[in-house]
Amino acid sequence: MGPLQIKDILQTAPENQSVVVKGWVRTKRESKNAIFIALNDGSTIHNIQAVAEPGQFSAELLLTVTTGSCLKVTGQLIASQGSGQAVEVKITDLEVYGTADPEQYPLQPKRHSLEFLREIAHLRPRTNTFSAILRIRHALAFAVHQYFNEKGFFYLHTPVITASDAEGAGEMFRVTTLDLNNLPRTEEGAINFKEDFFGREANLTVSGQLEGELGAMALSKIYTFGPTFRAENSNTTRHLAEFWMIEPEMAFFELEDNMDLAEDFVKKVITYALVNCKDDLNFLQNRLTEEEKNKPQNERSLPLLEKLAFVVDNPFERLTYTEAIEILLKSKPQKEGKFQFPVTGWGIDLSSEHERYLVEKHFKKPVILTNYPREIKSFYMKLDEDGKTVRAMDVLFPGIGEIIGGSQREENYDKLLGRVHEVGIDPENVWWYLETRKFGTAPHSGFGLGFERLVQFVTGMGNIRDVIPFPRYPKSAEF
């Protein structure tokens, strides 16, 4: 199965046994008594120190051992003579797999800005910060699958190419094989999509939810976890053009069941990261603490581990949108004009500053808001009896605002058809979705969680572009 990884070697008792270490050089330091090489293979935030004696290897060979070069080191595992590590490798043989010219290699041992590292996304996983983020991202993805498997859910693969717009927002990437320099036209002069590959307009999906509901109407409990795409021309720290969504859909779940599942789910996956990614989380917390020192005291965030414990250890507060509006209208920031977007009354779409006030200042715990006005929510959400609100729910976290959006879905055919007409969707485009309400309809619910939003919360990173290996955003599709 290949050589032992550095993570495992660091946990091994030193008995002068022979070991082989393969990895990339982080630093090399020479003194008159020894040559110290710090190696890392990405399996852990920690390096392993390999030590050679002066004159043991040729000067020509050692000149190729620079930051970024890749080595195979053979030697004895011994107790470390210095502080900072329990074991080290006494080198007996050294092979250079690949060199890294220090005049050209951009990741020299110094602090680099996140903006600079985005420009070299092919190399940034070799840094401590991004290797930690990617290990945490893996752990969270594993925890998602483990959680749903243990709860009796089935993993459903929904289409990446679709002819429907689940959100009705229209900001979608078109998929076509038509020759853009010689587009076929109808008699009216419009593009003739009947000549296209699928015989109709097609796009990259913005959500797997609608197809997920179809699966839930047969398998009872399903979840999707796949890439989604939005052609939103946004350059904020919260938006990506390509990202991953987790979307469970459950037959026979009503709004209360949906909230219970969402709360349990996020607590369990965050707990998994806390248990299994301690070293990486401690590293990121120390990094963030250094950054926070430059901010005024009243603008500093909770330490990362405290913020995660805030979510895991507190029961989520549940209240209606109407109750939230009443609290916000009476709040100090509202009365003193501190909100960037003043709360004008019932019916507004809450901004992240309103959501964070409820979580961080008023309740001091995560919040689930329910029963939003129908006008600001999607067509598929179940109407409440008052006809004014829908059975929606949003989970709000500290520092980020909304992290989960969901609802009980409308299972009544006539009401759903009415909402389809109301928002201007052609029923022919969603005939299959409507038809599930004609054949064995049932109460059902679900929610969506943007995976990068979760990774951003758990790692404490300020920009969502830094929690996905190769970010896609306006005017950027490198790598």
Image (spheres, helix red, strand yellow):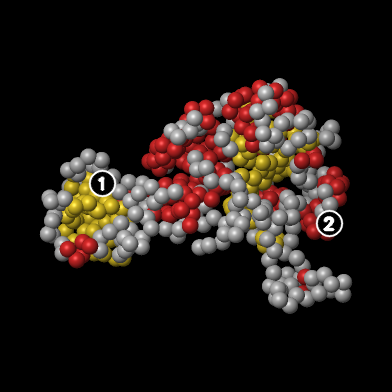
Could you tell me residue 463's position as x and y percent? Answer: 53, 46
The residues bearing labels 2 and 1 have C-alpha atoms spaced at a distance of: 64 Å
Badge 2 element: loop
Q: Quadrant of residue 435?
A: bottom right
Q: Is residue 148 visible?
A: no
Q: Which mark is residue 395?
A: none
Badge 1 element: loop
Q: Quadrant of the N terminus?
A: bottom left
From this view, report whether residue 450 is shown above or below residue 63: above
Of discs 2 and 1, which sits in the foreground? 2
Q: Amino acid at mark 1?
A: Thr
| Nearest to N terminus: mark 2 or mark 1 | 1
Could you tell me residue 300's position as x and y percent? Answer: 50, 31
Image point (42%, 58%), residue name: 123
Could you tell me residue 450's position as x and y percent? Answer: 60, 47
Could you tell me residue 373's position as x and y percent? Answer: 78, 36
Q: Looking at this view, is 109 or 387 the one in front?
A: 109
Image point (83%, 46%), residue name: 419
User: In the rendered image, which residue does mark 2 sit on?
Assistant: 426
Q: Which mark is residue 12?
A: 1
Q: Looking at this view, is 275 or 83 the one in front?
A: 83
Q: Amino acid at mark 2?
A: Asp
